[in-house]
Amino acid sequence: MLCVRAPGRVNLIGEHTDYNEGYVLPVALSLELRVHASPRSDTHCRVYSELLDEQYEFDLAALPAPDALPRGFIRYVAGVAWALQQHTGRTLTGIEATISSELPIGAGLSSSAALEAAFALLWNTLDNLGLERLVLAQLCQQAEHVYAGVHCGVMDQVAALLSEAGCALFVDTRTLFTQSIALPRDWAIVVADTGVPRTLAESAYNQRRAQCEEAVVALRPLLGEEVRALRDVSPEQGALYLPLLPEPIRQRARHVIGENARVLEFLNALAHADAARVRALMLASHASLRDDYEVSCPELNAMVDACMAAGAIGARLTGAGFGGACVALVEKSHLPEFLAQAERYYRQHARYEPRLIACEAAAGATRCV
């Protein structure tokens, strides 16, 4: 029996920048997913989810096409198998696997990337593939593109595989340069789940990505061929040229350009434990996601207000938006009062059942101890 754990992740800042080749600052969470698996003597796979009470089967020697599988967790598992086999030219070992998870589904904590990372590490170990973690992350991203139909960036998979305990992970998604950034020891991370399922996130995500690509096409004749992505547009250039773009393309580009700048400022603010600057940057990020990127909702806005009213250092929506969760940074000494006050405020302003979870910054996927 082989056991692998993989963390959920929350993004402290840098939302919707990863597929624009920009900067992100995720942190892996102490909330995690586990896979217990036994190898088989053939290429058959039987995978059971305890959380969903669902079981599916497929054969690695004749992997079904994405559309031949039901939507849900099994597409991610089969997608990882497909990506690993495509990359290595090998047929993987069949498994009997059970998935258990502490991650709330639909909260924007990237349970899908945790699932992908766990199975990638599982097969990498089981079949002695010898693949480095960054390669595994890229293959997991391919799996999500092809089998789940979500054209995600690589942030979630990199965070799930490369994070270090006690640190956030700065990622330049163009070069895939990563750097662990220590978090202040007296700050806690709180995941504030609104209870709103992210029903529009997938379709809207792909739409926003297409709109960003339209913005690049429109800006390239003005700024030169070196503009490959919105990451290549400075805030100064944006102020000058974005007014020439039509809405909503202008709004989408304005968010991404501003968000990349906020990530770089945030690194300096964290290094100095500058609570006032962290607060300003997180709130500016949320406002931009709400107004320019238009991926918030009344409940996410209410949760940010609840967190700030309860004394958070800073708070913002995290993940794709349209429901899911907010992330807040909170002084550990104030944590019990914060959790009670934020929940009470949110219940007064929203009809959904909240869930506020205090977390530590965890390591990326590993074999279970």
Image: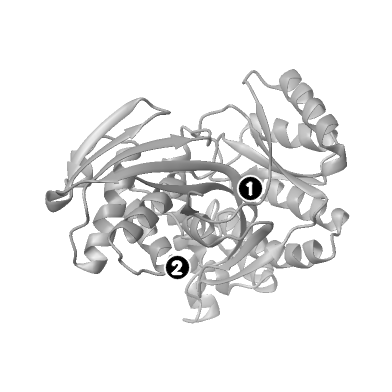
The location of residue 121, given as percent across then percent down, is: 39, 56
Residue 298 seen: no
Question: What amino acid is found at the position of numbered circle 2 in the picture?
Answer: Leu
- Residue under the image location 87 percent in, 41 percent down: 333
| Mark seen at residue 297 | none
Judged by depth in the image, the label closer to the viewer, 2 or 1, is: 2
In the image, residue 55 sits, relative to residue 117, either above or below, namely above
Q: Residues within 10 Å of mark 2 (few under 14, many from 20)?
A: some
The location of residue 287, given as percent across then percent down, is: 71, 46
Quarter of the figure that contains the N terminus: top left
- Residue under the image location 42 percent in, 53 percent down: 117
- Residue under the image location 71 percent in, 32 percent down: 303
Tag 2 near tag 1, CB within 8 Å: no
For the residues labelled 2 and 1, the Cα–Cα distance comes to 29 Å
Q: Secondary structure at mark 2?
A: helix
In this view of the protein, which residue sits in the foreground, 109 or 251? Answer: 109
The location of residue 22, given as percent across then percent down, is: 56, 66
In the image, residue 69 sits, relative to residue 163, either above or below, namely above
The part of the image, by quadrant, that contains residue 36 is top left
Q: Secondary structure at mark 1?
A: helix
- Residue under the image location 50 percent in, 72 percent down: 174
In the image, residue 290 sits, relative to residue 212, either above or below, namely above
Query: With 337 as the anchor, is 287 left or right in this view?
Result: left
Q: Residues within 10 Å of mark 1 (few under 14, many from 20)?
A: many
- In the picture of the structure, the residue carrying the numbered disc 1 is 289
Residue 323 seen: yes
The location of residue 154, given as percent across then percent down, is: 46, 60
- In the picture of the structure, the residue carrying the numbered disc 2 is 134
Question: What amino acid is found at the position of numbered circle 1 in the picture?
Answer: Leu
Of the numbered discs 2 and 1, the one sitting upstream in the chain is 2
In this view of the protein, which residue sits in the foreground, 175 or 9? Answer: 9
In this view of the protein, which residue sits in the foreground, 186 or 342? Answer: 186
